[in-house]
Image (cartoon, rainbow, N blue to C red):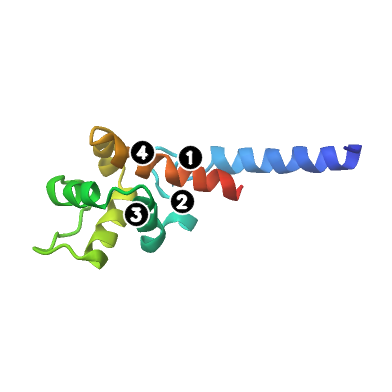
Amino acid sequence: MNHSCMETATLELDTLREYIENSDYYPFLERGVLIPFLDDEELLYDFYLKANCKRELKQFCKRVNWEGKPSVPRVVDEPALMALLRSACNSYDARKKLEKYKNLLRFALLMIPLTYICSEL
């Protein structure tokens, strides 16, 4: 790698480091809302479908209360579940409660989006 490429790479890493240190978004800020490119109901829902934990997600959304949780309809259909999931992902309170919930569900929320973020950097 020549000197110019190394300087550019160093500058890009410094810019990324500064962004992360000053970010208001989760996962960079533990209490932040979800980073914008992951704040999408369909994308988040897809993480759970790929992790094969729709049933656990539905149980969590029905049984657990968190700050800012929208009302839960009597019948939780797919659009309602997607909205509840987005709310949970944007809530520090819900994320902390998920950590104490089933391992599979916790993995899907905490690890799959982080893997996606890293692949996009």
N-terminal of the two: label 2 or label 3?
Answer: 2
* Residue 64 locus on image (x, y percent): 16, 45
Residue drawn 11% across and 64% down? 75
Report the residue that reaches farthest toward the left. Answer: 74
Q: Are marks 1 and 2 in contact (CB under 8 Å)?
A: yes
Q: Which residue is mark 2?
A: 35
The image's mark for residue 49 is 3
Q: Kindly identify the amino acid type of the residue bearing the numbered disc 4.
A: Phe
**How far separated are the C-alphas under marks 4 and 3?**
13 Å
Q: Which structural element holds mark 2?
A: loop
Examine the image and state in which quarter residue 78 appears. bottom left
The foreground one among 66 and 121 is 121
Mark in the foreground, 3 or 1: 3
Q: Kindly identify the amino acid type of the residue bearing the numbered disc 1.
A: Phe
Residue 90 visible? The answer is: no
N-terminal of the two: label 4 or label 3?
Answer: 3
Q: Which structural element holds mark 3?
A: helix
Q: Which residue is mark 4?
A: 107
